[in-house]
Amino acid sequence: MASDEFDIIRRYFNSSELAFPIPELSLGIGDDCALLRPAAGMQLAISMDILQEGVHFLPDADPYLLGQRTLLVNLSDLAAMGARPICFTLGLCLPTADEVWLDGFSKGLAQVAREHRCTLVGGDLSASNPAHASKTLCVQVHGELPVGTALRRSGAKIGDLIFVTGTLGDAAAGLKVLRNACKESLSKLHRAALVDAFFVPESRIEAGQLLRSLASACIDLSDGLASDLLHILQASDVGARIELDALPLSAALRAAHSEAEQRRLAISGGDDYELCFTLPAENTEAMRQALGAIGVSVTGIGAITAGTDIQWRELGEPVVLKISGYKHFHSALAGVVEGAH
Ligand code: ADP
Ligand code: MG
């Protein structure tokens, strides 16, 4: 039995699977702070994501998949800036010391941590408020990149082309599968693909680093294209034209929902953690070659224009869409929410 907080840390988190040495790390778990030695000429990129039971995941979520997802959604922010992961810290509020859950969760974390050489260097652990008795998972990731090379949201220029990696809407459709809100006839294979997209988003870490020298602006799609692309537009003081027919949709998404719902999920479902980026047209071939070489699919979906908003188009004609991404404190909360990230 894991008896107390220190026991839990020692048994599940301060393990060679999760807290492994890396060259930049002088001191890991065990003291009041971890000590890191950033390499000369490099800049730290730091980001944090919170995952709450009932908001970001269902209470019965598989702990291994949840462990993977907790780190992957954080790594996605590093990918969006073009940073290489170094390490992370972990904050946990848990109602009980459930050993099965701790074992699965820490193994899921470790799988992603090792794959990306992103080591656990510290954290905090607390019992949840008994009045709520739910889990809150918080990760802060640290990455690095050469000083001044980060992919920002603010670099998009009029005439740049807009691309997304992978396919859109699968993660939100996966959440609907988990809630039994898809076509009954949907095959096992398609159900699995969609649920997988929700729990284990593809890592775009390598793609982000390759895009550093090619893209003009980049963001990861956590709230959905409609909402996240606006962040690029606002930061860059430009508008965009998006061709709805061009949005990349998976076979599983097409099989699961009506065309209208496919489109809604692709635009505002959220949780895809794909990259949306802009680049000068002359970099298109180099970008396609670079991403093709690492097996990342990429789709052109539109272009940056003058203005401040997104002009959606279908078959070459403007259309009006009344949808947006998920906003905490603005959207009505009812259990796990599609697009809450
Ligand atoms: P303090 O009380 O000084 O903040 P703690 O007693 O909470 O530190 O933690 C002791 C050590 O264990 C610290 O190095 C801390 O970073 C680490 N730690 C605590 N919780 C976790 C966790 N969930 N995962 C990894 N390391 C942790
Ligand atoms: Mg201390």
Image (cartoon, grey):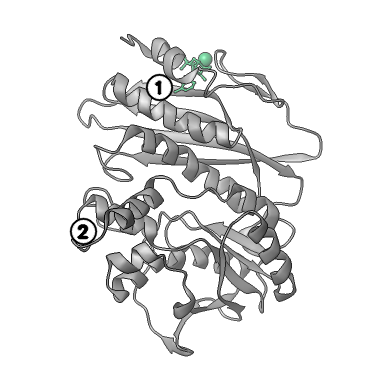
Residue 125 marker: 1
Residue closest to the far right = 40
Ligand 1 under 8 Å from disc 1 Cβ: yes
Q: Is residue 152 above or below residue 127?
A: below
Residue 237 marker: none
The location of residue 227, given as percent across then percent down, is 44, 65
Residue drawn at the location 32% of the way across and 8% of the way down: 3
Q: Is residue 328 visible?
A: no
State the SS at label 1: strand
Residue drawn at the location 59% of the way across and 33% of the way down: 118
Circle nearer the viewer, 1 or 2 = 2
Say which quarter of the image contains residue 240.
Answer: bottom right
The location of residue 27, given as percent across then percent down, is 64, 17
Say which quarter of the image contains residue 271.
Answer: bottom left
Residue drawn at the location 44% of the way across and 37% of the way down: 68
Looking at numbered disc 1 in the image, what kind of residue is underneath it? Answer: Leu
Q: Which residue is mark 2?
A: 181
Of labels 1 and 2, earlier in sequence is 1
Looking at numbered disc 2 in the image, what kind of residue is underneath it? Answer: Ala
Binning the other alpha carbons within 10 Å of mark 2 as few (below 14), some (14 to 19) or many (20 upward) gives few
The location of residue 214, given as percent across then percent down, is 72, 62
